[in-house]
């Protein structure tokens, strides 16, 4: 089992306070890393995450989006992200991955060894990584992984 590294976010949208994995321990967490200029994110990954947020909203699953900018930094500002969130009607909490120090790769992306976007990571109740998927994943497969984690015995 691999413990999930903490999220490093410089700003949050759609939540009253910053979210931390430490505070969410005991709950499964779906972490969706995306870029608003990533075609696969816009067409598949981000809408899929919104659907998961809506489908599992009555469970204790916490869905978190992470705007993980590793290219086109000048174009993907927080102002542009705010407009993107509004236009695409995204309602799940979204953090902005903290900029890397001396590298274009942001902090959380580095911590998880993400290959790119979209990336979906499911973190179990125990804080360990259950699933780390890069690229488009089927709704059925991701839903099954989430459902299995939600059904797993607590403790």
Image (spheres, rainbow, N blue to C red):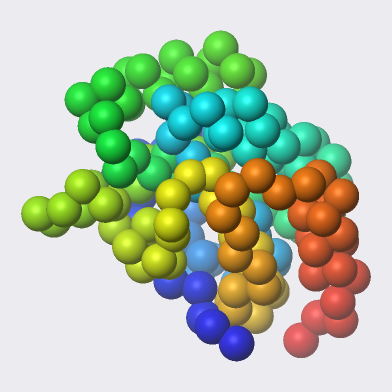
Q: Position of residue 54 (x, y in %)?
A: 79, 36
Report the side of 9 relative to 58 (left or right): left
Answer with the quarter of the image where residue 61 lies. Answer: bottom right
Judged left or right of residue 118, residue 59 is right
Counting from the top left corner in percent of width and height, residue 135 is at 59, 48
Residue extending furthest toward the left: 102
Identify the residue at image location x=50%, y=73%: 4
Can residue 88 be seen from the camera position used here?
yes
Residue drawn where x is 52% and y is 22% of the image: 85
At horizontal 81% and vertical 81% (from top left) the residue drawn is 154
Question: x, y percentage for residue 129?
Answer: 60, 74
Q: Position of residue 17 (x, y in %)?
A: 46, 44
Residue 133 located left or right of residue 102: right
Q: Residue at x 65, y 44 (%)?
A: 136
Give the mark count: 0
Q: Is residue 53 above or below residue 19?
A: above
Of residues 84 and 72, the one nearer the viewer is: 72
Residue 26 visible from this viewpoint? no
Quadrant where the C terminus sits is bottom right
From the viewer's side, name the closer residue of 54 and 133. 133
Q: Work out whether 76 lies above or below 128.
A: above
Q: Quadrant of the N terminus?
A: bottom right
């Amino acid at each position: 089992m691999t413990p999930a590294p903490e999220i490093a976010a410089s700003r949050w949208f759609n939540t009253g306070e910053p979210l931390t994995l430490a505070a969410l321990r005991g709950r499964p967490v779906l972490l969706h890393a995306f870029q608003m200029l990533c075609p696969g994110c816009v067409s598949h990954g981000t809408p899929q995450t919104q659907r998961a947020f809506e489908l599992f909203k009555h469970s204790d699953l916490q869905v978190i989006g992470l705007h993980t900018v590793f290219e086109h930094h000048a174009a993907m500002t927080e102002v542009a992200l705010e407009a993107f969130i509004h236009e695409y009607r995204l309602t799940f909490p979204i953090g902005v991955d903290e900029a890397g120090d001396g590298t274009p790769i942001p902090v959380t992306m580095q911590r998880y060894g993400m290959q790119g976007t979209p990336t979906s990571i499911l973190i179990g109740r125990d804080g360990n990584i259950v699933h780390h998927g890069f690229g488009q994943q089927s709704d059925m497969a991701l839903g099954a992984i989430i459902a299995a984690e939600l059904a797993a015995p607590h403790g």
